[in-house]
Image (cartoon, coloured by chain):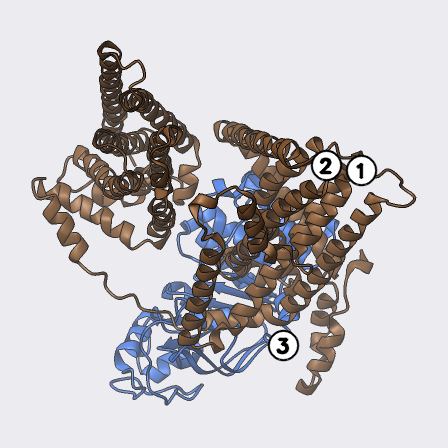
Amino acid sequence: MANDRSTNGEAADSATADRGNPDEWDRVYAKCELLPSDDHEAAILTRLRLAMFWSHLRYLMHDAQLRTALLVVLSAFFWGGLFVLFHRGFEFVVSHVGPTGETYHAQTVHFVFTLFFASLQVMLIFSAGIILYGGLYSSVETGFLLSLPVRDERLVLYRFQEALLFSSWGFFLLASPMMVAYGIVAAAPWWYFLLVPFFMVSFTYIPCALGAIGCLLLIHCLPQLRKIIVGVLAVAVIGVAYQSIWKTLDMAQKDVLDATWFSDTFERFGFTRGEWLPSTWLSNGLLEAARQSGDFEVDNPWVESAKFLFVLGSNALLLHVLVVAIGKRLFRKSFHQLNARHARKRKPAPEWPDRIANLLMAPLPRRTRLLVVKDLRLFRRDPVQWSQFLIFFGLLLLYFANVDRFRQHRADLSVVTWVNVVSFLNLAVVGLILSTFTTRFIYPLISLEGRRFWILGRLPVDRETILWGKFLFAACGSWAPSAGLVLLSDTMLDVELIVVLIHQMICLLLCVGLAGMAVGLGAMMPNFREQSPSKIAAGFGGTLNLVLSALYIMLVVLMTALPCHFYLLGKQTELNASLDGLKQMELWLVLGVTASLVLGLLVTIVPMRGGLRAFRRIEV
Amino acid sequence: MIRFENVTRTYGTRVAVDSLVLDVPRGSLLAMLGHNGAGKTTSIKMLVGLLRPSSGKLLVGPFDVVEQAREASRIIGYVPDQPFLYDKLSGREFLTFVAEMYGATPTEAREAVTREAERFQLGDFLDRLTESYSHGMRQRTVFAAAMVHQPEVLVVDEPMVGLDPQSIKLVKDLLRRYVDAGNTVLMSTHTLSIAEEIADSVAVMKSGELLFSGPVDALRENVAMTGHSLEALYLAMMDGEPSNGEPSGEWEGNAAEPLGGGPGVGGEGAHGE
């Protein structure tokens, strides 16, 4: 073990010589010489991570079986779905563009690979940088580790490994089915499948390391940067990115999928095939590995593939060295600089949202209004809640605002069919996103009240009022943006009035039902020991709420979407449009809507009744 | 053993610690006193390397905590005001990790964990995940982690908050014995009776400035309130010392250290104090 210990005393000796260096420090220097070496430090941190991993795995297997099972099944489902999609896609390329080995086939697959990996490359840079920032600069654990004698570069590397893992799992989940599907369709030799994991790992390391270096440099330089410069730069970057994307995607609808369109598109995305891009090295390496050769002495594809793998690997290693060097030089300094900033005093929040909420809830009892306004204030002042809400609903808004392409093909019957399907799918997407919010933010509300129950429980209000207040807050708060989004989608798709009305009714049912379920189940299964809302939501009750919510959404949407779809189809095509047939479809539609109403009421009332009963008996 | 040499710490334009000059000799326990926002936690965080002084020098033993952060942290044990534990590790795993990070071999770490577990009466809980610990248990585990490498200097921020009487007694006895064995403790606390009971000297801070440092008896002489408790002395000092640094009332200034003559600075820094 003595070999594992570094000689830190030497540096200390020289640095402290000017202080007289009394003999009494001998014991202190001796202790410093026993500090672990770099490799030993790495081994200790690896053991720490392994211990936490096994402990977490035991927890998942014993205490969170539902969540674990759900995670595994959904991941497998997602992977399988992607595999089928890519397999069909590559089969389409083989049958319509050309078999493996032909120029057009190679060009098409190369185009798909480079575009796909270049996009993921950019995402990996950003996600690794953001995750590393969270781990290095705003984590309590880093503060703890900094109080231990850990080398700065080791700490950076420890956090970087975490960022690498968390940012790249999505890449593995998305890219692996595509690579396997291509290998099978192209009848790739065995070494293709052997090389795939090595390609993936060495590729992933490069953008993640770039993101990490960017994060360290940015935080280091941030205190010197003036806010106005950062703002102007950010606006410029967004402007250029927007312009580039717009220019790339802007094309006339009538030309879609003909030869000119294909050639134009190939040219437009030429920047993704740059020779200096790691995504291009990865694409080339994979395509070479999958290629068959008639004469291995003249043309050896696996050697060609290995060259690209070496390029990726050597670049990854170089960037690893750079991350360590920059971490050693800048991390502690930047950590201290970041902590030296003046804490901004928050301005008091504007009161107009409260006044509007009070106005809208005027018919309700005053105490209920007070409780709802309190929850509204907590929501507004918690950036974690409203920022996630804003990001997801903002993305949906962006998508819905651009979904009007179908309008140009209204005469086409298949397009009309798709319009109806897409409009209901959009409704389901709004519901599913809403269910994640009710699970993440509404379900834990009662559990989080545990610590505040000394005040809530002693207020001169019925406990029912507290629960109804939360229900109203959740239902009304989610209904307004959801109804707006669904209306936007319907307007852009130009669906019939009856569809708009049905959608609005279902949207209301979803908001009320999801709110009832989250509040009711949250009161039935509170967890007063846990303070973190994400951990409460990730428990058994939260997972159950998420699963039941998803089932409810699917049932309600299916029960109305199918009859509505066939009713409209029958009406528009006038195929066999006998009066009896149409009336039957109308009846089916009415039955579907009625069943949805009944289900919505059940889903709201049953959990709320259970929740009210449990909440009355709660002892904290 | 601990020396603040004209240490100043600012958050933007706000001064959290102003030209702090403080010496804590080996084998003594110094209690830092002051209202919230006085600069106690900022001083402690600078001492353990979590914050860097804006100016001045901070020495622990022979080491400069900025230039030789790793060596300095080897001889310091730190109990923060908001302790961190890995929820998914048992107490034993956590303590072993900390011991090994300080350079203990697996055998030495095992022995050290057993020693500290006995000292802090962790036996029954040692192999349970720390997420199931009560506040008192967590605090005792953090103390054990701070002591597991037998540091020369122990830095403790608000050690008694949330502890039951038995644990308070345990910690008080521990700190006293530890100092009597020739080690050094710097403790920040609001519990004045405990400071009076176990501290060799006190340092009183207000708005980032050091008002007084020295033994409690010296404080009595300065405040001219013989026979009164530390609490009475402290309150008299705080009430009598206006924020502009001018003495008034019964407060006669500090014989041990010169009073900070700069303008008083109100409010808290970015990180508590």
Q: Is residue B127 visible?
A: no
Amino acid type, callout 3: Glu
Amino acid type, callout 2: Thr
Q: Which chain is brown?
A: A
Q: Is residue B203 visible?
A: yes
- Provide the residue designation for mark 3: B67
The Cα atoms of the two marked residues, 1 and 3, are separated by 60 Å
Crowd rating for badge 3 (residues with CA inside 10 Å; few <14, some 14–19, many 20+): some
**Colour used to depict chain B in the structure image:** blue
On the rendered image, what quadrant is the N terminus of chain A found in? bottom right
Between B47 and B117, which is closer to the camera in this rendering? Answer: B47
Circle 3 SS class? loop
Crowd rating for badge 2 (residues with CA inside 10 Å; few <14, some 14–19, many 20+): many
Dot 1 or dot 2, earlier in sequence: 2
- Provide the residue designation for mark 1: A292
Write down the quadrant of residue A28 in the picture. Answer: bottom right
Which one is in front in this view, the residue at disc 1 or the one at disc 2? 2
Q: Are marks 1 and 3 on the same chain?
A: no
The Cα atoms of the two marked residues, 1 and 2, are separated by 9 Å
Q: Is residue A375 above or below residue A512?
A: below
Residue A248 image offset from top left, x and y in percent: 50, 55
Amino acid type, callout 1: Gln
On the rendered image, what quadrant is the C terminus of chain A found in? top left
Please say if the residues under marks 1 and 2 sit with CB atoms less than 8 Å apart. yes
Residue A100 badge: 2
Left or right position of A164 against A237:
right
Q: Is residue B263 above or below residue B169?
A: below
Write down the quadrant of residue A414 in the picture. Answer: top left
Which one is in front in this view, the residue at disc 1 or the one at disc 3? 1
